[in-house]
Image (spheres, grey):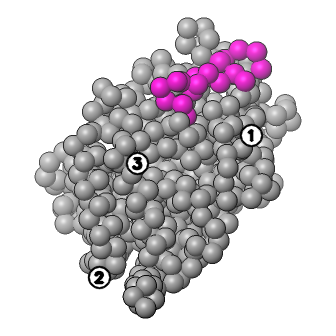
Amino acid sequence: MESTSEEQRVNEDSTELFQLAGQIDSTLDSRITSLLSNVRIFNAFLKFFDVEELVPVGSSQDGSKVNVPGDGGDVDILLISKAVVLDEDLLEYDSRFPAYARVWGIEEHEKFLKRKRLIDDVYLPVNVLKNLEHRLYGLLRFYISIATRPGISDCGRIYNTFRESAVGFEVAALDGESALTAVQINQVPDIRIGKFKVGMKLIHNALDSLEALALKEDPHDFPDSQSQASFLNLVECVASAVIKMVHLTDGYETKKECFKRQERHEPEPFTVPIHYDIAESLQIVGETIELPKLMTADMVPAFSVRGWPRVAEEWITRARRWPTNELVQDVVHIGCQIVAKRPLYPELNGDRKNEDHSSEADEYDDCFRLSFSQCELALAKQFSEIQLLCWRTLKAYQKSFLRNEPPVLTSYHWKTVLFWIREETDDEFWSERNFLNCVSKALDFMITCLLDRFLPGYFVRKENLISGCREDLVVKTLNMVIEIRKAPYAYLLNFVEDPPTPDVYPVSKDKIRDFVRAENQQTLVENITGNVIQTVVVCGYE
């Protein structure tokens, strides 16, 4: 009788926790859906060259999104080369960090990566990937600058910016109203605009990238000479559009120019009200300000690997209840990539901010990390609604109670835990009446890993995902997970009723000086965009 009563109580607690988990906001923010739409458009453009593609992965695709008020979360996007596929046999794995490898720049790889300076005449430097970044990221930045309009929006609610990251570059939408409280723009009378400096800078950068790409002879850049010729024509079209834009926005003219314009019965040069010399008008306290994050997107260049990694062969054959053999083979067929990411070396004291990512350091850095993002997405798409709710619950705990600086755990660690416990459980385990046990099992798994100071990677079992983390922060995190395990409902209720504030994003005053836009600059951007599109369409590149 007592066992029946206890079982009933557990079922009731499970139902309550399940219903509470259903209140977690997992919708995609409008900014994210807009970005993903732009990714599809940009991929349509990249098909013209058939050498790279953007592949969204992570929570924007797998259903695990957990939002807090004001913060739509992160988007992870791989920029995968379709022309360069590395042979797995030419990867040399690190025994200390099994999911990391050096890449031999010889034999099969030479035809793709010739003329690249090798480390010790043998290994590829990580700036091989960053060269991929420079070839197309200039163009991608130009596209994003038009789509997101860097700077404080005309309504003042959003501050858009992007910056280099350790493995690629990052786009961020930040709280513009908070920026305006820290930045004061002195109003001045309306004047004619000379040059739209910010737009011109972005366009010139894009053109530089386009021209550099067009003149390359590396087969990675162009599949054939016809593509190269077509691309050069496209560069001409864009350049023509830029020239038109410059003339349109040039409000200054000599008497001679004015006379010729009047003779041709042309209208007066385009003028808009604008604050003059914005950089000198800004009053900012300190070198940086921290703005609440609304959304970020990480663009990460990657090379695909031909063949399943030797260090992950155990994943194919390990004893498990999930995934099925068919799904395992599908995942192996999807394969993995490598990205330019280093291990958390002991000398960094657990903090990646101590890493040196200068161009000089990248030139002598030969450490790449295996990325199974697409494999993880394929597995996550097979999760049931109960499993997704469990995943979101764990991520809610992470967002509210387990954030340290520098971090020990991230959302990725909880995804790994969920994969592990899914392997050892039957389908019947995942039910509403057993939801409390589902969450508790994941918390218990994490507690064991933190006690052992070893959280195994899901595909590379010998990889320790918390290697290099600071001991004091591991202990702090362990104690917090133990507390959550004692009262999972109470901690989730705290998240739902008192959600955490958005993360803050540091922005330098120079960035703001570069990108703050005055009222009515939107008109200029739309005009620039229209001219570029019109010229490209006229020239046959619609």
Residue 90 colored in magenta in the image: yes
Give coordinates of residue 345: x percent, y percent: 37, 29
Q: From this view, report whether residue 246 is shown above or below residue 21.
A: above
Closest to the observer, 204 or 67: 67
In the rendered structure, which amino acid carries the disc numbered 2? Answer: Glu
Of pointers 1 and 2, the one earlier in the residue sequence: 1
Residue 446 colored in magenta in the image: no
**Residue that carries the numbered disc 3 in the rendered image:** 449
Name the secondary structure under disc 3: helix
Callout 1 environment at 10 Å: few (<14), some (14 to 19), or many (20+)?
A: some
- Going by the picture, which residue comes out furthest to the front? 1
- Foreground mark, 3 or 1, reads 3
Numbered circle sitting on residue 82? 1
Alpha-carbon span between mark 2 and mark 3: 30 Å
Residue at the (26%, 59%) spot, across then down:
480
- Going by the picture, which residue comes out furthest to the left? 285
Residue at the (49%, 67%) spot, across then down:
391
Q: From this view, report whether residue 307 is shown above or below residue 69.
A: above
In the rendered structure, which amino acid carries the disc numbered 3? Answer: Cys
Give coordinates of residue 75: x percent, y percent: 51, 58
Residue at the (56%, 57%) spot, across then down:
419
- Foreground mark, 2 or 3, reads 3
Q: From this view, report whether residue 433 is shown above or below residue 331.
A: below
Give coordinates of residue 413: x percent, y percent: 45, 52
> Along the horizontal axis of the image, is 244 left or right of 111?
left
Numbered circle sitting on residue 497? 2
Callout 2 environment at 10 Å: few (<14), some (14 to 19), or many (20+)?
A: few
> Along the horizontal axis of the image, is 101 left or right of 2?
right
Q: Kindly indicate whether the residue at mark 1 contacts the one at mark 3 (C-beta within 8 angstroms).
A: no
Residues in magenta, as a range: 89-108
Q: Is residue 341 visible?
A: yes
Callout 3 environment at 10 Å: few (<14), some (14 to 19), or many (20+)?
A: some
